[in-house]
Image: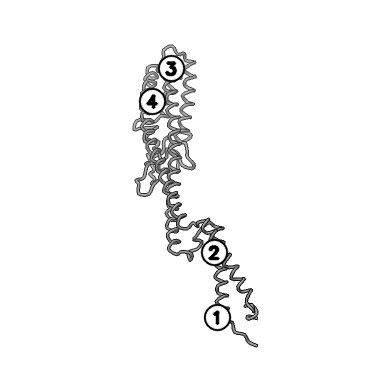
Amino acid sequence: MIYRVTDSKTDLTTRIGAQRSRIDVLQERLTTGKRINRASDDPNGAEAVLNLRTSQKQIEQFQRSAQTVNTKLTTADNSLESYQISLDRTRSAISQGLTGTTTQEARNVLATELESLRDRILNIANSKSGDEYVFGGTRQNVPPFDPTTRVPAAAPTAAQFVQIEPGSNAIASGVTADKIFSDASSDIFADLTAAAAALRGTGNAANDRATLVNANARLVVYNDAATNARLIVGTNMKTSEIALENLTGNFLSLDEQATNIEGADFAGTALEFADAQRSFEATLQIAASSRRSLFDYLG
């Protein structure tokens, strides 16, 4: 005998399938905490979330740039502070060497100290932040000063500018070595080398004294340059810190917007899930109470 599945039985099968699908959707929302798990759940909402996440990716790129700049500027400031401390000690040593009561033996010791300070300053001038020379500017293929000869790089370099916030002007990620450790007339290393030689004595006392006096005057120039550099670095450090705060705030704001769109109301979804399960169980009971089950009709 051939049985025909009645319309009521077909409706029941459709209802069971729809209820199962609904339960699956609600269960996925409870598991992921999201109302939108695929574009088909809410095409408009999914597009809005995608745009927000894309904006977050752009902000993350600026955050990385701002953090890199801030780290480099912090290193530069610390290096410049060490440089000025070394300059102060250098000035003290040279002044002591100019004192008439200082013995030659003491002058020799001071000369050795000057050379040590010169080498320390060389390390400062060639200091790095990550893989970049802090005072190298846009020229990063060679150190600002030759590590052996202490000769400056062939040509001055330009400061490196980086945009750290959308719509803002780029800022300098540091200052260049030629603005701090040298000028048109000389550099700190040549001056300290000459001062050390003068302390040891070249055989011309008058010239040696003039060299030491000139070195002391030059130290004032270098210290002023370092102070000006620290003002620039400090200003840009503050700018980068404010940018990082703004970027973090914007990122969190976008994240909140995206969460509001795609996020599921856990309590509401849990209640809806419970109602869906009850409805599904009720439908199954109706199916089971029929004189013949759907499976009987389907063979």
* Residue at position x 48%, y 42% in the image: 131
Give the mark nearest the N terminus, 2 or 1.
Answer: 1
Disc ID at residue 219:
4
Query: Quadrant location of residue 199?
Result: top left
Q: Amino acid at mark 4?
A: Leu
Give SS at disc 2: helix
What percent of the width, then of the height, locates residue 291? 64, 78
Residue that numbered label 2 is attached to: 25
* Residue at position x 42%, y 20% in the image: 94
Q: Amino acid at mark 2?
A: Val
Residue that numbered label 3 is attached to: 96
Does 168 sit left or right of 27 as displayed?
A: left
What percent of the width, then of the height, locates residue 162? 39, 45
Foreground: 141 or 226?
A: 226
**Viewer-side label of 3, 1:** 1
Residue that numbered label 1 is attached to: 7
Q: Circles 3 and 2: CB distance less than 8 Å?
A: no
Question: How far separated are the C-alphas under marks 1 and 4?
Answer: 100 Å
**Viewer-side label of 1, 4:** 1
* Residue at position x 38%, y 28% in the image: 223
Give SS at disc 1: helix
Give the mark nearest the N terminus, 3 or 2.
Answer: 2
